[in-house]
Image (cartoon, rainbow, N blue to C red):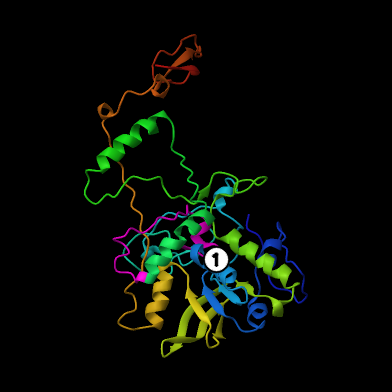
Amino acid sequence: MPLPRLVPAEDHVAVQSTSFATDALGRFVANTWEEATSSGLFSAVVIGAGAYGAYCAVQIRRVHPDARVLVLDAGSLLVGEHVQNLGAMGLNVPSPIMPSADPGTARELVWGIPWRGNVEFPGLAYCLGGKSIYWGGWCPRLTASDLAAWPAATRAWLATHYSLVESETGVVPATDFIFGDLQAALLPAVTAAAAGVPGLTGVEALPLAVQGAAPVSGLFSFDKYSSLPLLADAIRRDVRASHRSDTARKLFLAPRAHVVALHTSGGTVHTIELDVAGARKFLGIAPGCQVVLAASAIESTRLALHSFPTPLMGRNLMAHVRTDFAVRIARSALPSSPARCRPPRCSYAARPRPGGSTCSSPRQPAGRTPTTCCSA
């Protein structure tokens, strides 16, 4: 049944409560707009707290310990880690729809479509962590041909830091969930066949961001990767180091702060325009402050093209696209597999039906009970 909407009251509490939950997690990792923006000037403002934004904010603090970083996100806190680590909670990705069919309200609690196009898509997850708490992350390396037109310094930096990112996201050591005798027979055949296909550079294990082993002795595996726990941990470390003083803190997260425009002068951002919980706000950017566009590919592209309309803008904007395809391999092309890999043959015990008859159909109709399965 529907619940009554909660409305702000005049009195204030340290941690807010709903009918079912105490919002300690939200209070411990996030700040109100007023708390964050009145604490002082920032060295960097990261727009987006999803897969890239949350990770980027953590890295800025690691590399530049004295930097003050503000993370802005249009969504609110939904969960603290990947939904698949929480069991069957019912937090699902909505089915793709045409943007023209957008109902104008959130689907599956937090999913919305912020653009109009001619391709079906589920939209964006407007919550801290973004799609990184729903979908499987991975870290595929760009090939040499992909990077051919990129600046040499960028190519060198990627080559140096890929292994670090792969390690932090759980891509290495590799966790291959497809294994067994059939895989052992199939992989060499696919690898050999791929060598003769133009354009294919090799067959590798998927660089999935899933940690299948404990990172150190005494800890459980983190399992499915999301950037949100990294950001939450960095924020709590900052809170402890500052002795809970906002003026001494160096990392803030402001949810429900949707950046709608960047105001620039001479190619430099001087003001960020936002919608904060339904109210229009403007954040002044100090000279030397770095503004990082780390929202989704569509949102970041929109902000970049709208805010920096120069001939070169957009030349190196990239969006990752994955293509799934099915491969059919004739059984005769594979070597003989062990008996335990062959399809099982099941037998059924007859159970009397009402009236004294029994079932004899091999399709297990009503009245038949499976008993044992044996190797062929």
Q: Is residue 95 above or below residue 124?
A: above
Is residue 78 something one can see in this rendering? Answer: no
Decide whether residue 149 is among the magenta residues. yes
> Residue 216's x, y, as percent?
63, 48
The residue lying at 33 percent from left, 84 percent from top is 310
The residue lying at 70 percent from left, 58 percent from top is 21
Q: Horizontally, is 107 left or right of 11 in the view?
A: left
Q: Horizontally, is 238 left or right of 230 in the view?
A: right
Where's the N terminus, which quadrant?
A: bottom right
Give the residue pinned by disc 1: 54
> Residue 346's x, y, as percent?
44, 18
Q: Horizontally, is 311 left or right of 246 in the view?
A: left
Is residue 307 something one can see in this rendering? Answer: yes
Residue span colored magenta: 124-152
Q: Is residue 223 above or below residue 11?
A: above
Q: Please name the amino acid that badge 1 sits on.
A: Ala
Where's the C terminus, which quadrant?
A: top left
The residue lying at 56 percent from left, 52 percent from top is 83
> Residue 142's x, y, as percent?
36, 59
Identify which residue, 22 or 315, lies in the foreground. 315
Q: Main secondary structure of the magenta part?
A: loop
Decide whether residue 290 is among the magenta residues. no
Crowding near the residue tagged with mark 1, few <14, some 14–19, many ≥20 C-alpha atoms within 10 Å: many
Q: In the displayed image of the protein, which residue is found farthest to the bottom?
A: 265
Q: Horizontally, is 123 left or right of 241 in the view?
A: left
Identify which residue, 197 or 295, lies in the foreground. 197
> Residue 114's x, y, as percent?
43, 69
User: In which quadrant of the rendered view does residue 229 lie?
Assistant: bottom right
The residue lying at 55 percent from left, 87 percent from top is 286
